[in-house]
Amino acid sequence: MKPEARLIELGIELPPPPPPGGNYLPFRRCGNVVYLAGVISVSATGEAWSGQVGAERDLGDGRKAARVCALNALAALRSVTGSLDDVKQLLYLGGYVNAVAGYGESPSVINGASDLFVEIFGEAGKHARAAVSVAGLPRNATVEIQLTAELRSVENGEPASRRE
């Protein structure tokens, strides 16, 4: 099943793509590879998942925050071509968890994003990744992720989803 149809089946509506929070681009495309800037755990409704896992937040909160980041990343990715159906595969996910010193469950937190990607893209959603704890993130966000994806080939400047 194509990713856009899968979103509908799952009842997921993507938020608007998050604007850059500084002097940088929301994405950079090199051929068919797209590098997304980091997105933090702020929902489309403005609900901020903030605070450290292991202090103000627990593992479940961290997973939810990672899922919010994944939705933001998908919105940014969709903004590149207009359709997630143009994504051939996800390549790499860098996950950062705002956590107390010594917190060792960062991979479990970042699974909140990884699981959603696989749920939407299937095998093409599986990716290489890093999941690390950090002492702080912008706006005291609980999670930040960066995503790299490969797009389907573009012919004559037109994405695959617009040719079908």
Image: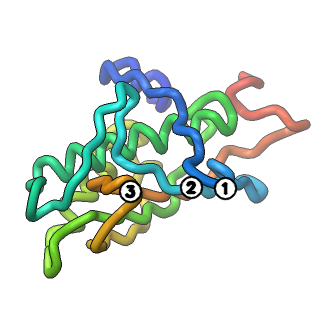
Which residue appears farthest toward the right when viewing the image? 156
Please tell me whether mark 3 sits on a helix, a strand or a loop: strand
Q: Residue 36 vs residue 28: left or right?
A: left
Tag nearer the camera, 1 or 3: 1
Which residue appears farthest toward the bottom when viewing the image? 102
Q: Do the residues labelled 1 and 2 touch (CB within 8 Å)?
A: yes
* Residue type highlighted by circle 3: Glu
Q: Residue 59 location, x and y as percent? A: 11, 56
- Closer to the camera, 162 or 98? 98
Mark 1–mark 3 distance (CA, rounded to whole Å): 16 Å
Q: Residue 51 vs residue 88: left or right?
A: left
Is tag 1's residue or tag 2's residue first in the polypeptide sequence? 1
Mark 1–mark 2 distance (CA, rounded to whole Å): 8 Å
Q: Residue 155 location, x and y as percent? A: 85, 39
Q: Please name the residue shown 27% across and 55% down the image.
A: 142
Q: Residue 129 vs residue 88: left or right?
A: left
* Residue type highlighted by circle 1: Tyr
Mark 3–mark 2 distance (CA, rounded to whole Å): 10 Å
Q: Residue 118 location, x and y as percent? A: 35, 46
- Look at mark 1 in the image and give the residue it sits on: 24
Q: Residue 105 vs residue 141: left or right?
A: left
- Look at mark 3 in the image and give the residue it sits on: 144
Q: Please name the residue shown 57% across and 39% down the image.
A: 19
Q: Do the residues labelled 1 and 3 touch (CB within 8 Å)?
A: no
> Label 2 crowding class (10 Å Cα cut-off): few <14, some 14-19, many 20+?
some
Q: Identify the disc placed on residue 103.
A: none
Q: Identify the disc placed on residue 37.
A: 2
Quarter of the image containing the C terminus?
top right
